[in-house]
Image (cartoon, grey):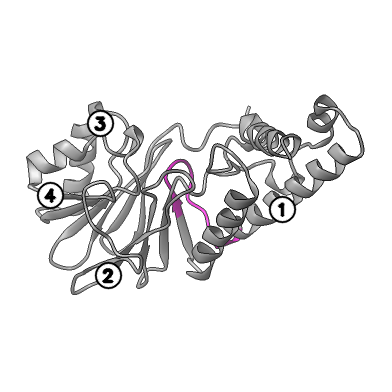
Amino acid sequence: MVKDPAETAKIIELGEGFYVRQAVDNIAWIDLGEWVIVIDALEERSLEREVFQAIESTLPKRPIFYVLNTHTHYDHVALNEAFERRCGAKIVNLSNSQIEPEGRWFEGSHRRAQMLPLTGLHTNEDCVVWLPEDRVLFTGDLFGWGLIPTGRVTPDSAAQLEQTYQRMIEFDAATVVPGHGPICTTAELIRWVEYFRWLRDQVTARCQAGESDGQIRTALTPPADMADWWRFALWKHEDSVNKVLRSVRKG
């Protein structure tokens, strides 16, 4: 049995002063020069001690000024209070801060970070975070290793999804950090758009040909080159097939 790469947390160094704790839920701490930003704040408050020990061991005595939440679902904000209490950090997300459509920049002497709203798919407060000097993009839950990041697939939401992915792809990130699971590259974002188009075309054609829902689910197996995507063959492909199937059946 292949071991789930996200079940055991590990610290990944993406550059000087740039760290990601990769697990089921991801968190990053990044030295901009004079101070540190944190991106997302996990799901479990019980991880407070472990996380702060990891930060202190990698960026000792560096002040943490901001915590950027890609959105405010519970699994991205659990340690917000701890960062406020311990560091006096300011929490920044679209539920408590005004961020213009062109984004908000956080600039230090060593690197910059842009927090950019890409709302209306997973939530109405989705943001990505882009670090141009490192070519690293944090997608929050807009990329989910095969998941369609919206509850309902409609013509409008499908068009918005492709537009949102195109904007993320245009960053040409060397490293992509999803909200959950293993880090990846822009190639996975491109492949997911291809998969989404293929899935919609296949389901539409098979519905028009009179196939039953069961026949369609059986026929549409995970693409071979995506079979090793994180938890994709386990349940994410099935979830995406079902969302598209419901959409097509409703016309």
The spot of residue 155 in percent (x, y) is 65, 50
Residue behind mark 4: 89
What's under tag 2, amino acid-wise?
Arg
Asked whether, in this view, residue 225 is left or right of residue 101, the answer is right
Residue behind mark 3: 47
The spot of residue 65 in percent (x, y) is 13, 55
Q: Is the magenta stretch mostly helix, strand or loop?
A: loop
- The C terminus - image quarter: top right
What numbered label is drawn on residue 197?
1
Callout in the foreground (1, 3) = 1
Chain-order first, disc 4 or disc 1:
4
Crowding at dot 1, Cα within 10 Å, few <14 / some 14-19 / many 20+, comes out as few
Is residue 71 or residue 2 the one in the foreground?
A: 71
Q: Distance between the residues labelled 3 and 2?
A: 27 Å
Residue behind mark 2: 112
Callout in the foreground (3, 2) = 2
- Which residue is located at x 27 percent, y 70 percent? 112
Q: Is mark 3 on a helix, strand or loop?
A: helix
Q: In which quarter of the image is residue 44?
A: top left
Q: What element carries label 4?
A: loop
What's under tag 4, amino acid-wise?
Ala
